[in-house]
Image (cartoon, rainbow, N blue to C red):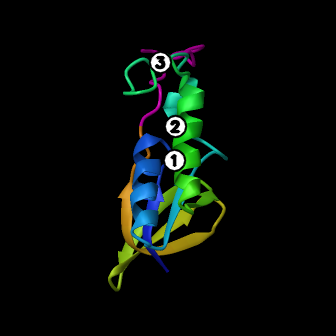
């Protein structure tokens, strides 16, 4: 049983992992893709992160992950498909059939590019 299950390994999820780990809470970060650091990873250049101008999104995401790992963040790779609550705790179910139980859920799954609902419309839309 985890104190906190953090769904999402982007900046918000990894920040939550740092705080949870520093507070010595048993927590786990759930990420859909191995070593995913969120949508920021595909940004060519991030100029608005204080103290790290002109850093690539990938490099910034790696710094976020390294910070979380430094404090002992635990990671699980899997696609969460449902969250249920019973007897005062939450159960996160995954596409592969595995489940994780926790006292608290932080849902920080972030965003994804919008897709056009037309043939050939899989290009990124901003």
Quadrant of residue 47 within the rendered picture:
top left
Point out residue 81 in the picture as x, y percentages from the top left corner.
51, 57
Q: Nearer the viewer, residue 27 or 24?
A: 24
x 44%, y 24%: residue: 114
Q: Nearer the viewer, residue 108 or 118?
A: 108
Q: Is residue 105 magenta?
A: no
Q: Residues within 10 Å of mark 2 (few under 14, many from 20)?
A: many
**Circle 2/circle 1 CB separation < 8 Å:** yes
Image: magenta residue range: 111-126
x 64%, y 45%: residue: 35
x 59%, y 29%: residue: 59
User: Is residue 64 found left or right of 20 in the rendered image?
Assistant: right
Disc on res. 38: 2
Q: CA distance from mark 3 to mark 2?
A: 21 Å
Name above or below for residue 72 compared with residue 109.
Answer: below
Q: Residues within 10 Å of mark 1 (few under 14, many from 20)?
A: many
Of badges 1 and 3, the one in the foreground is 1
Name above or below for residue 31 compared with residue 104.
Answer: above
Classified by dominant secondary structure, the portion drawn in magenta counts as loop
Q: Secondary structure at mark 1?
A: loop
**Circle 3/circle 2 CB separation < 8 Å:** no
Specify the farthest residue to the bottom: 87
Disc on res. 9: 1
Disc on res. 39: none
x 51%, y 47%: residue: 9
Name above or below for residue 22 compared with residue 113.
Answer: below
Disc on res. 116: 3
């Amino acid at each position: 049983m985890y104190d906190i299950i953090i769904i999402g390994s982007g900046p918000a999820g990894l920040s939550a992992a740092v705080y949870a780990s520093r507070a010595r809470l048993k927590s786990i970060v759930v990420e859909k893709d191995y070593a995913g650091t969120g949508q920021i990873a595909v940004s060519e250049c991030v100029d608005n992160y204080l103290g790290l101008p002109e850093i690539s999104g990938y490099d910034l995401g790696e710094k976020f992950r390294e910070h979380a790992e430094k404090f002992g963040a635990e990671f699980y790779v899997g696609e969460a498909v449902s969250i249920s609550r019973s007897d005062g705790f939450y159960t996160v179910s995954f596409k592969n059939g595995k489940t994780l139980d926790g006292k608290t859920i932080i849902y920080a799954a972030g965003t994804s590019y919008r897709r056009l609902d037309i043939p050939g419309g899989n290009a990124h839309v901003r």
